[in-house]
Image: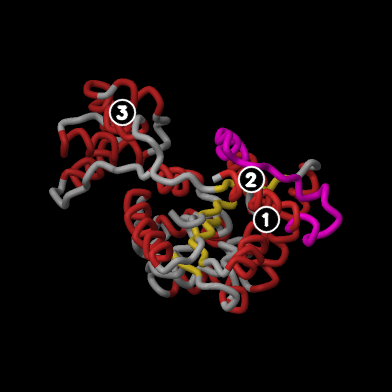
Amino acid sequence: MGEIICIVGPTASGKTKLSIALARAMGAEIISFDSMQIYRHMDIGTAKPTPEERLAAPHHMLDFLDPKEAYSVGRYVQEADACLQGILSRGKPVILVGGTGLYIDSLMAGRSFAPTPASGRREELTALADAEGIEAVLAQLRLVDPEAAQTLHPSNRKRIIRAMEVYLETGKTITAHNAETKALPPKYQPLWIGLDFEDRNALYARINRRVEAMFAQGLASEVQALLDAGVPERATSLQAIGYKEILAALRSGAPAETAREEIALRSRRYAKRQLTWFRRNRAVSWLQVDRYANFDTLFNEIWQIRLDSTSKS
């Protein structure tokens, strides 16, 4: 199997810059595992690679979905895996980069997902939740899959409906399905590279600067353009950090700029959750970005890790 490198880490840690530098040096192609960069017309708030950056190497799983559409990890695995296999079949290395842990873990594991046929059951469960509250669906789930019901918070409406839908469609609980898929050996064994910061405040300062840059680039106008194009406020795409906070400001009659600090705060909290997720993976080689004098020294260290990994395989 060809060479696969996964670059993980919190938002604003420099993953995009590293992926492009590695792709140039290796002649690789890049696959994104970011659950919001999949949407068209959402460039600023998702920190999508610029057109100039994308000229450095072929990029995949970016800019292909209308913001009005919903998406799922199951669909991502199916489409990204076909993309990955296509690159490997051309004899090219693959670099995967992003911040959505569930996407990359599921893809590398080769995890399968319960089918979602258009039977109308999801719509029925959604209607029940709308009419009686999500607790009505959660009560049904407790009867058939108490383990899933125990782990799902009532605020996680989407996953509660999905868990109940899986049981109604397949006769098998989502707990049983997940246990079966996790028991299988992983489909891929990539080299995992993680970017972090020894000084957490250094990361937070980068996040704050990124938020400032987003506003300077026109984030508020990007959000307004999505609304003007008819994207519903409840669309999955508009629940992304940066978009949701500006929507709340606009809804209250406040200027979009008043959401600036809230966006920075939620981005910092998101970075902590990302690190918690990725640190569960013991295969990740972590590098503290702020320990290196410059990007070149960081890159050289990663290149050596790559060479050592290749020589062992």
Determine which residue is flagged by label 3: 175
Q: Does the stretch in magenta take in 115? A: no
Give the residue at x 39% y 58%: 80
User: What SS does tag 2 mark?
Assistant: helix
CB within 8 Å, label 1 to label 2: yes
Q: How is the image coloured?
A: secondary structure
Query: What is the tally of numbered marks visible in this picture?
Result: 3
Inspect the image, locate mark 1, and give the three-letter code of the amino acid beneath it: Ala
C-alpha separation, residue under disc 1 versus residue under disc 2: 8 Å
Inspect the image, locate mark 2, and give the three-letter code of the amino acid beneath it: Ala
Give the residue at x 62% y 40%: 275
C-alpha separation, residue under disc 1 versus residue under disc 3: 34 Å
Inspect the image, locate mark 3, and give the three-letter code of the amino acid beneath it: Thr
Residue 77 at least partly seen: yes
Determine which residue is flagged by label 1: 12
Determine which residue is flagged by label 2: 271
Nearest-to-viewer mark from 2 and 3: 3
Quadrant including the N terminus: bottom left
Give the residue at x 51% y 62%: 93
Residue segment shown in magenta: 275-299
Residue 130 rendering spot, x and y as whole percentages: 28, 43
Q: Is residue 10 above or below residue 40?
A: above
Residue 44 at least partly seen: no
Q: Quadrant of residue 163?
A: top left
The answer to whether residue 187 is left or right of residue 208 is left
CB within 8 Å, label 2 to label 3: no
The answer to whether residue 115 is left or right of residue 43 is left
